Image (tube, helix red, strand yellow):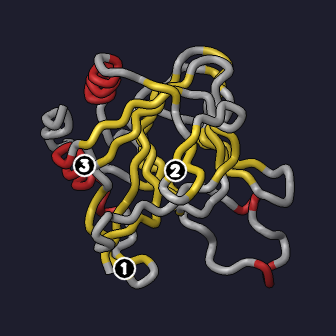
Amino acid sequence: MSKILSSPLTKQLVSTAVNLSPILPAAPQFRTVEPLAFIVREVCTLEECAALIAISEANNYEPALLNVGGGRQELRTDVRNNSRYIRDDPVLAESLWQRIRQFVPETWNGHTAVGLNERFRFLRYDPGEEFKAHLDGNYVRPDGTETSFLTLQLYLNEGFVGGQTTFVANYTDARVPVVPETGMVLIFEHHLWHEGSKLIEGRKYVIRTDIMYRE
């Protein structure tokens, strides 16, 4: 699996900001710096995404658990009811990092970007499955040397109905959907409220990991 992204891309990648203004406070005095959220299309090829899907399906998907704090996880199908396969792959993490690092803020909260979390969470959604609005938590290395501030999602397929990654406001009904495209990466701050919107038709595959920073 680690060799899937070993070949360099031949095309120039471009990042595009996600317009989050609909979910931000209307009054300027309640806004600080606009939160970070952007996409990069065609980070991975169709063939690479298909290979990642195939390898994940050759392993065991299990019901996705919910982090409930204190390092504990619980099965909460009222919040999320999709399937998940977890794989640690430092080589794949480095290969993907080399493709997207030019777009990642070099510093964040006094920390310096060092790479991706090698823990890849393959997420699979079938019709009726979703992950309701939530915040992503920071991942901290056991030795405390690194922490994450940004989420990375890599979409492995498209052609399904529903299943957007949707940013939401916790005080209005405003929504900002991001429609998955095969090989596209979405990067955003952990503290942004978002959901994996309900899948209506088809099957959705996405990888989620974190961007790690060191003080």
How many C-alpha atoms fall within 10 Å of the one at disc 1: few (<14), some, or many (≥20)?
A: some
**Quadrant (top left, top right, bottom left, bottom right) of the N terminus:** top left
Which quarter of the figure has residue 140? bottom left
Residue 204 x/y as whole percent = 51, 24
Which quarter of the figure has residue 184? top left
Do the residues bearing badges 2 and 3 touch, measured as CB atoms within 8 Å?
no
Q: Secondary structure beneath disc 1?
A: strand
82 relative to 179, above or below = above
Closer to the chain start, of discs 3 and 1, is 3
Q: Secondary structure beneath disc 3?
A: helix
Viewer-proximal residue, 37 or 83?
83
- Which residue is labeled 3 in the image? 93
77 relative to 12, above or below = above
Residue 68 x/y as whole percent = 59, 51
Alpha carbon separation for disc pair 2 and 3: 25 Å
54 relative to 5, above or below = above
- Which residue is labeled 2 in the image? 72
- Which residue is labeled 1 in the image? 111
In the drawing, does residue 91 fall left or right of residue 99? left
Q: Nearer the viewer, mark 2 or mark 3?
A: 2
